[in-house]
Image (tube, rainbow, N blue to C red):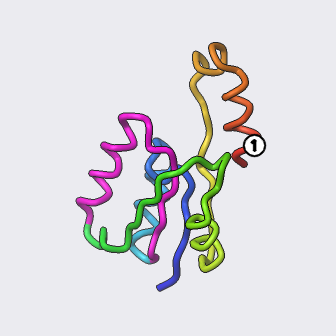
């Protein structure tokens, strides 16, 4: 069984990738986990069979941690599902919007 890293794997889009991947791989989910939906999605993921294949690392892609770098190095693949998509946030804090969507990639 190989390993994959999924950035924002607990987000609204990433959770689908995580669901399909953790049946066949060890999955490392990386993200800020700030939105309420992420917590709900993680609870849901942990309720699935083979949830022992799931590891969660909290962090911000704009400032990758050594732990994330180590996990990526030993992974077969990585998937980037992270983005700031709320239009209201892009208007009220456009700098953060660009940082997340450009620098975090």
Left or right: 105 as drawn, with respect to 21: right
Q: Residue furthest bottom?
A: 1
- Read off the residue under disc 1: 103
Residue in view at x 27 percent, y 51 percent? 43
Residue in view at x 37 percent, y 37 percent? 37
| Quarter of image, res 38 | top left
Q: Position of residue 78 (x, y in %)?
A: 62, 65
Q: Which residues are magenta?
A: 25-48
Q: Position of residue 36 (x, y in %)?
A: 36, 34
Left or right: 59 as drawn, with respect to 104: left
Q: Is residue 42 one of those drawn in magenta?
A: yes
Q: Is residue 100 above or below residue 73?
A: above
Count of numbered labels shown in the rendering = 1
Q: Position of residue 91 (x, y in %)?
A: 66, 14
Left or right: 102 as drawn, with respect to 29: right
Q: Is residue 6 above or below residue 38?
A: below
Residue in view at x 49 percent, y 54 percent? 9
Front one among 65 and 52: 65
Asked which secondary structure carries label 1, the reply is helix
Residue in view at x 61 percent, y 65 percent? 66
- Please rate how many residues cluster around mark 1, counting C-alpha atoms within 10 Å: few if below 14, some from 14 to 19, many from 20: few
């Amino acid at each position: 069984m190989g390993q994959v890293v999924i950035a924002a794997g607990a987000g609204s889009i990433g959770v689908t990738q995580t669901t399909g991947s953790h049946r066949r791989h060890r999955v490392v989910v990386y993200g800020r986990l700030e939105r309420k939906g992420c917590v709900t999605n993680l609870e849901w993921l942990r309720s699935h069979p083979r949830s022992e294949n799931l590891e969660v690392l909290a962090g911000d892609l704009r400032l990758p941690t050594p732990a994330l770098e180590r996990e990526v190095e030993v992974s077969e693949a990585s998937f980037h599902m992270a983005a700031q998509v709320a239009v209201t946030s892009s208007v009220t804090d456009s700098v953060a919007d660009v940082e997340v969507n450009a620098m975090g990639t």
